[in-house]
Amino acid sequence: MRTVRDIMQTDVISVRKGTSVQELVQILDEEGISGVPVLDSGGSVLGVVSRTDVVRLAAREPEIPLAEAFWEGIGRESEDDTDPDSYFMAPESSVMLVPGGAGLSSLAFDEITVDEIMTPVAFSVDPEMAVRELAEFLVHGRIHRALVLEEGRLIGIVTAFDLLRIMAGDVAD
C-alpha cells in the first residue's frame, strides 16, 4: 500500500513569519507554486499562505480611479460626434488597477506580512497515511495541500497535484 511518504515532496519551500507579501508573491512566481507553510523562527508551523490569500488581500483594497489626465485628448478633439473615439468610455465610470502603477502604494504588499494574511491552520497528515485516505482528506476538506508532520516536525508537503501525478502514472508503483 502506497503512503504519503511515498509521494510527498521533501524539499519544502517555506517562508518565515514577518516575510512581506511582496516577497511571497516573488517566491510563488519564481517557484511556480501556489502556497507555502509559514514558520516561526524556531521552524514550527504557524499556518499556510497561498495565492488565494494574496488575491483576497488585493480584493479588499479600493479601486483606483483613472486620472482625468489620461482621458485628455481621447475622443475629445473631434469637432463632431461621429468620431468613434468619442464613445470610447466614460472616464467617471472607469477604474484601473495596474500592478506597479502609480497610486498602487496603497496596496503596500511590501508593508504587509504573510502572517497577517495566512490561514492560521495548517492541514497536516502523517507520513504513513494511505494515499487513498489522503485523497479523501483533500477532497472532503476542499484542501489543495497538506503538510506532512512527523513528531510535530515538518518533513514534507503533499498536494492534489501529487495525487494527479500518481493517477497519470508519473510515479513508480
Image: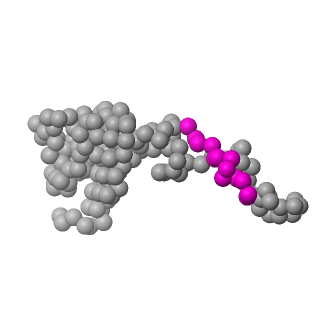
Where does residue 116 sit, x and y in percent of width and height?
35, 33
The residue that appears at 87% across and 61% down in the rendered structure is 79
- Locate the N terminus by quadrant: bottom left
Query: From the viewer's perspective, is residue 27 above or below residue 62?
Result: below
Q: Nearer the viewer, residue 147 or 102?
A: 102
Where does residue 81 sit, x and y in percent of width and height?
87, 59
Q: Is residue 46 left or right of residue 42?
A: right
Is 66 part of what is drawn in magenta? yes
Instruction: Work out which residue is located at the far right of the displayed protein and give it.
Output: 80
Instruction: Work out which residue is located at the far left of the displayed protein and give it.
Output: 151
Where does the magenta region start and end? 62-74
Q: In terms of image quadrants, where is residue 154?
A: top left
Query: From the viewer's perspective, is residue 113 above or below residue 94?
Result: above
Q: Evaluate whether residue 76 shows in this view.
A: yes
The residue that appears at 34% across and 52% down in the rendered structure is 26
Q: Which of 95 and 136 is in front in this view?
A: 95
How is the model colour-coded? Answer: one colour
Where does residue 64 sit, x and y in percent of width and height?
58, 42
Where does residue 95 sit, x and y in percent of width and height?
63, 46
The residue that appears at 28% across and 62% down in the rendered structure is 165
Q: Evaluate whether residue 122 shows in this view.
A: no
Query: From the viewer's perspective, is residue 63 above or below residue 8?
Result: above
Is 10 part of what is drawn in magenta? no
Number of numbered discs overlaid on the protein picture: 0
Q: Nearer the viewer, residue 120 or 133?
A: 120
The residue that appears at 36% across and 46% down in the rendered structure is 22
- Locate the C terminus by quadrant: bottom left
